């Protein structure tokens, strides 16, 4: 948005003088409003809210001195810049300053001198306005700081209590909703997950209670890590059995895939844990059953003790499949398989006659989840968690410290200064953590399909019809490849949906060059619009040019590669 032109009020009872001043000021880009006597000037100050006043001294009725004195007596105009303009000199200048004028210029005035004085006082006015706005903002922050800090502390304490009994996802959902209506009974499609240990019954009969609890602790530690990693909701954790589900209380688009990913990850974790148990004489393994369907979800229990549950045929189906699973098997039902078919490799194990189901149920053993999808999703969720937990905790800590600084600043300035230094270090550490996380955001298509595939996918996602021309011989360091990808995507996102564009990438003579050309002025070409793109390129020693002509927009960049 363009900055508003400064507004100047010209006050003079001689029309010729007003027109002269107006001609000088308007030609320099100022907005001018006028008044022909003192009373009219005071009224215009209230209605027009000028940034500066050029005030004639000698006028009928209220003269310039009286007008200036009244302005200075009003808190709203006490610091409004006033330049006195008069044909008199000597004592008049002293009286003008005593009345509160900021400056004085005699008639006939020198245009350049007048404009210089106007610019100087307007600059001071802008500084004052900025300080005033910041003071008001700071006052508002101080007014609400204690309330906001207390709300954050209460929320963290509530979350800590809830996490003793609920899954992290459910606890977060309850706290963020502000009440517990999310726990009320409702219907929702869920991916239901059951797992329990094979060989458990004979194991229980053969070991001491202390060893049994040790093994359970090791198994539950694995489950706990996977619950956090895949954002599962815990139905129950009883002995060697665990029930988890996905898509409630928070709806997610890939519930079925996440359940399968967790099952495969559990199998991998058990592959490392089984040899440890075997050395202690225990032959244990895990079987998993997963199904997709609708359930009634909500809080169940009684006063003082309640759980969150998902109840329905899908729960029974997942439990029965888990009963049929052999050690190391992850059995999924037909309906769930249809949802994840493109993402998993399975072996059909046949049909089972399950208790509670009139017809045989087809089941599939998941051999693997395609590794690129699993790695990309896991890394994305890890980054999301670290941003949520790390950034939020850092901000809450800073808010608490700010409150402490506020209390100490008058009673113990030295302690307040030390706390500010500590907060400065915390801010720098937090920024370093955020930068490290940003470096991990690497589109998986770049690894699996290269720049051509990644750019084609990105263009489709933002609705741009793009022709991607990446030389087959382009093989560059991952940092440069990632930078080019992010720059091209950053540019494409600014084109209107449906725009046609060409993206070309070439590597030659130690330089990686890219160019985006689009038909039509679909992209704003100001530096501010592409500041992030330019920063990425220049951070690696490159350069970026932007041009728009003949109805087309062209963005070109280059990076040195080693």
Image: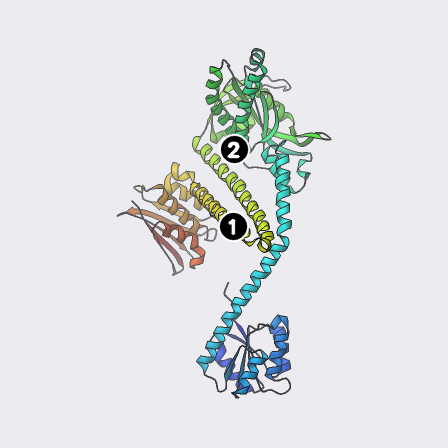
Residue 266 placement (x, y as % from top left):
50, 25
Q: Which of 356 and 298 is in front in this view?
A: 298
The residue tagged with tag 2: helix, strand or loop? helix
Residue annotated with mark 2: 229
Up/down of 414 relative to 282, above or below: below
Identify the residue at horizontal 47%, vertical 75% (top origin).
28
The residue tagged with tag 1: helix, strand or loop? helix
Tell me the quarter of the image containing the C terminus.
top left
Q: In which quarter of the image is residue 332?
A: top right
User: What label sits on residue 27 in the rendered view?
Assistant: none
Coloring scheme of the render?
Answer: rainbow
Whether residue 521 is visible here, answered yes or no, is: no
Residue 417 placement (x, y as % from top left):
52, 52
Identify the residue at horizontal 39%, vertical 44% (top origin).
482
Whether residue 265 is visible here, answered yes or no, is: yes
Residue annotated with mark 1: 418
Q: Nearer the viewer, residue 438 or 291?
A: 438
Figure disc tally: 2
Frontmost of labels 1 and 2 is 1
User: What is the crowding at mark 2: few (fewer than 14 residues within 10 Å), some, or many (at least 20)?
Assistant: some
Q: Nearer the viewer, residue 428 or 159?
A: 428
Would residue 167 be found to the left or right of residue 343 on screen? right
């Amino acid at each position: 948005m363009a900055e508003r032109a400064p507004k100047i009020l010209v006050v003079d009872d001689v029309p010729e003088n007003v027109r002269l001043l107006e001609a000088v000021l308007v030609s320099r880009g100022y907005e001018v409003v006028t008044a022909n006597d003192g009373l009219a000037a005071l009224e215009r100050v209230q209605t027009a809210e000028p940034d500066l006043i050029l005030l004639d001294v000698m006028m009928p009725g209220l003269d310039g001195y009286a007008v200036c004195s009244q302005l200075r007596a009003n808190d709203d105009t006490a610091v409004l810049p006033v330049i006195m303009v008069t044909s008199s000199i000597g004592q008049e200048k002293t009286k003008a300053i005593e009345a509160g004028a900021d400056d004085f210029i005699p008639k006939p005035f020198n245009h350049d001198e007048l404009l210089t004085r106007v610019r100087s006082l307007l600059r001071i006015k802008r500084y004052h306005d900025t300080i005033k706005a910041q003071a008001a903002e700071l006052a508002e922050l101080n007014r609400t700081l204690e309330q906001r800090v207390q709300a954050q502390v209460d929320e963290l304490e509530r979350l800590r209590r809830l996490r003793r009994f609920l899954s992290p996802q459910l606890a977060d959902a309850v706290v963020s909703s502000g009440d517990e209506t999310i726990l009320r009974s409702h219907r929702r499609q869920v991916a239901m997950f059951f797992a329990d240990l094979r060989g458990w019954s004979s194991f229980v009969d053969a070991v001491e209670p202390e060893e049994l609890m040790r093994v359970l602790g090791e198994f539950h530690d694995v489950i706990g890590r996977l619950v956090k990693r895949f954002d599962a909701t815990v139905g129950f954790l009883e002995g060697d059995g665990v029930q988890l589900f996905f898509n409630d209380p928070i709806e997610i688009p890939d519930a079925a895939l996440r359940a399968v990913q967790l099952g495969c990850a559990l199998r991998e974790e058990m592959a490392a844990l089984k040899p440890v148990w075997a050395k202690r004489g225990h032959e244990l393994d895990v079987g998993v059953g997963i199904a997709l369907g609708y359930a009634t979800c909500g809080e169940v229990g009684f006063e003082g003790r309640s759980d969150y549950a998902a109840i329905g045929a899908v729960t029974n189906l997942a439990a029965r499949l888990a009963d049929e699973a052999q050690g190391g098997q992850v059995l999924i039902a037909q309906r769930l398989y249809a949802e994840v078919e493109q993402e998993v490799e399975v072996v059909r194990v046949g049909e089972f006659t399950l208790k509670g189901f009139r017809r045989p149920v087809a089941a599939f053993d998941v051999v693997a989840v395609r590794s690129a999808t699993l790695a990309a999703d896991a890394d994305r969720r890890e980054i999301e968690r670290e941003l949520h937990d790390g950034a939020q905790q850092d901000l809450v800590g800073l808010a608490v410290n700010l409150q402490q600084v506020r209390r100490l600043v008058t009673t113990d300035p030295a302690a307040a200064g030390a706390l500010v230094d500590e907060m400065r270090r915390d801010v720098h550490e937090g920024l370093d953590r955020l930068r490290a996380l940003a470096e991990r955001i690497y589109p998986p298509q770049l690894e699996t399909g290269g720049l051509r595939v990644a750019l084609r996918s990105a263009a489709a996602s933002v609705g741009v019809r793009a022709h991607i021309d990446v030389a087959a011989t382009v093989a560059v360091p991952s940092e440069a490849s990632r930078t080019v990808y992010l720059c091209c995507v950053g540019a494409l996102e600014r084109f209107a949906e449906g725009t046609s564009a060409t993206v070309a990438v070439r590597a030659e003579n130690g330089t990686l060059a890219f160019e985006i050309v689009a038909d039509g002025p679909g992209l704003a070409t100001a530096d501010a619009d592409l500041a992030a793109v330019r920063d990425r390129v220049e951070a690696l020693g490159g350069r970026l040019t932007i041009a728009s002509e003949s109805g087309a927009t062209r963005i070109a960049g280059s990076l040195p590669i080693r």
